[in-house]
Image (tube, rainbow, N blue to C red):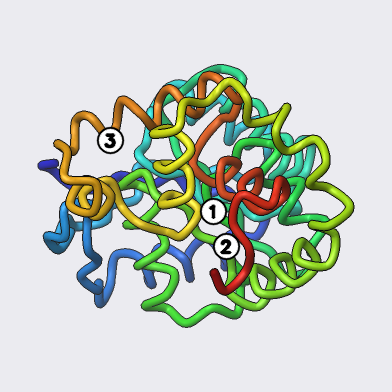
Amino acid sequence: MSGPLRVLLADAAPLQRAGLRTVLTGGQTVSPQEDGRPDTREIVVAGEAGDGVEAVDLARRLLPDVLITDVTLPRLDGLAVARAVSEARLAVRVLILTGHDSDEEVIAAIVAGAAGYLCKDAAHDELVAAVHAVAAGGAVITPPVLARMLNRLAGTLSAGTTDAGARLSPLTGREREVLIHVARGRSNSEIAATLRVSETTVKTHVGHVLTKLRLRDRTQAVVLAYETGLIRPGA
């Protein structure tokens, strides 16, 4: 990757957008890419929107690497924005910021196609790292919410695993293995090293998994892996 990392900010409050701009373009941290090398790209703000309709329009026209949107926006909320970007198949990753701490909301964000969900009180360097991670194709869920979600999943796995075989039946044995590694948070390069195959082969397997299971991205793949009992919290 070369060139600056371009972001679009969507928030109804001009002061909030100004604060985000300062954090993102000020003292920036270095974040690892999937190949293990640090992502040192400068973050630049490509545009700003004050409501959801404007955010979707600018996303279409500017095609930023990442759209950072408040979950609460006039006209279209952040979830609807993520859904519109996903349905339009734009090459734009969506990171949702929220003042809430709701498990249901983060699940709705994942279903809508968001690649990240972060609380507004996150540390500045955590936000910058999340932007880099999302831009690189990763997924970010605010840690406290993720921990609670995994605990809830653990409590319902016994009731939800009866149809696991049917839901995962389209996958080959190697594709299931790759899905397990994805659910454990491993990058393509790490999976390739573990399975002793090329990174291109891993990317192909991941693509097949998403296509066969009708999933939008790796985030939904992780959720499905836990829901079906393919992997358990702490495993």
- Label 2 element class: strand
Task: Calculate the distance from the C-alpha at mark 1 to the C-alpha at mark 3.
Answer: 22 Å
Amino acid at the residue labelled 3 = Val
Q: Decide if residue 95 is on the left or right side of residue 38.
A: right
For label 3, the residue is 202
| Camera-side residue of 123 and 24 | 123
Pick whichever of labels 1 and 2 is earlier in the sequence: 1
Report the amino acid beneath label 1.
Answer: Gly
In the depicted structure, whether residue 168 falls above or below residue 15:
above
Amino acid beneath label 2: Ile
Could you say which is closer to the camera, residue 33 or residue 190? 190
Q: Quadrant of the C terminus?
A: bottom right
Tell me where residue 234 appears, x and y as whole percent: 57, 74
How far across and down, in percent of the image, does residue 119 sit?
63, 71
Mark 2 highlights which residue? 141
Tell whether label 2 touches label 1 (CB within 8 Å).
Answer: yes
Residue 5 place in picture, x, y as percent: 25, 48
Which of the labelled discs sits on residue 116, or is there none?
1
